[in-house]
Image (cartoon, rainbow, N blue to C red):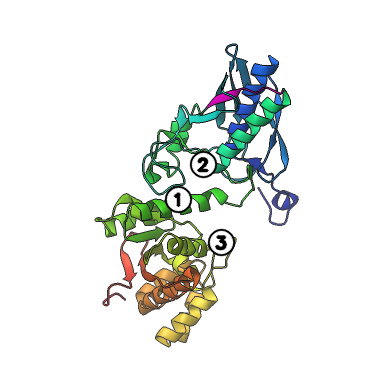
Amino acid sequence: MKVKGSDSDNRKLRSGFTTGCAAAAAAKAAVLAIIDKHAPSVVDISLLTGDILKIAVSDCSITGAATAAASVIKDAGDDPDVTNGAEIGARVRLTEKTRNLIITGGHGVGTVTRPGLEILPGNAAINPGPEKMITQSVKQALDSFSDPRGAEIEIFVPRGEEIAARTLNARLGIKGGISILGTTGVVKPMSHEAYVATIASGMSVAAACKTGTVICTTGRRSERYSQKLFPDKPEQAFVQIGDYFEKSMKLAVKNGFSRVVLAVFFGKAVKMAQGAPHTHAAKSRMGLDQLSAWVRACCDNKGLAEKVAASNTARQAFFIIRENCPEVFKDVAERMIWSAEKFAGSPIDVRAVIFDYEGGVTTDTSNPEAA
């Protein structure tokens, strides 16, 4: 059991590397194997930051006079990542076309099927950063032997389809496997860069699909309730923003949305109402004292306000408020809107919906009769 303040709790978290970096390492290993007639066990990869990272090669085989295949095991360090431990591979064929490099996606690499992403529909889901890193790594391998040839590089992920089922790729229109991602090549533990990238992609796809309104939820359950509340909206209109309140409002504006719906449970609603840019428990306090003050202002009931302040959780406070002073929900919703508009930084029409714990609507600012 981890004890707060213990060495295990305060240890420095370990960085890892992206799927893009893994693909670059596999491609470089395959090129070196062809030229040197020897399968390397480790390759040096130049990151887009300019740093050098040594990456172990899991498997490498020479399959012909000018062909080889290699793979690397993705290591996300201490960052939570569904691709951690995945095998990322590259099949390479050297060609006589001087310095002509062609990068494609093979089995387990998704194909983009909808507009709105950095990659045009019909192409493999290999983002520009990883493509640049793969190109750079292959050229370095060729240069190290003064080899003038070009290369055809096919990136593959043996369990890509299985892993993709645990991501939002299908929602974004990426079918058949995972995306090869990464901006610098390094995964910074607990940075949640991948989640922010997913929000950005979701917003972009929603805009490209001309959904008109983006419906922001904080997780799968609030999204499921939102889809029942808005059955006429396409799947692409719903974007799970997690705890990234401020970032998501800025992304909504950046993608041209003039209307946003925030559809959340009460605990997240209170944090949004308090203006927390990030609503995770580790990033912001629940602030039941502040909620208590709002109850006192709405209901002029000191005893009720003290009960709310003494609550153990937002859920407990929710039921106290619902029974005794439901008008507080409308006040919280209006404060959510004010915070969202502030974070957006540009004029935007925000609608706030607060769900109860069974999926019912506790308040909805579009309904003048809502509590």
What residue is disc 2 on? 127
Residue 133: % across, % down: 61, 37
Q: Residue furthest right?
A: 7
- How much space separates mark 3 and mark 1, taking CA atoms? 25 Å
Rendered view: 191 above or below 126: below
Q: Residue 132's x, y, as percent?
A: 59, 39
The magenta stretch spans residue 104: no
Circle number at residue 201: 1
What residue range appears in magenta? 146-153
Q: Quadrant of the C terminus?
A: bottom left
In front: mark 2 or mark 1? 2
Q: Is residue 223 visible?
A: yes
Crowdedness near tag 2: few (<14), some (14–19) or many (≥20) residues, C-alpha within 10 Å = some
Residue at the spot x=46%, y=30% of the render? 108
Q: Amino acid at mark 2?
A: Asn
Question: Which residue appears farthest toward the bottom when viewing the image?
Answer: 300
Foreground tag (3 vs 1): 1
- Which amino acid type corresponds to the residue marked 3 in the rendered image? Ala
Marks counted in the figure total 3
- The quadrant where residue 262 appears: bottom left
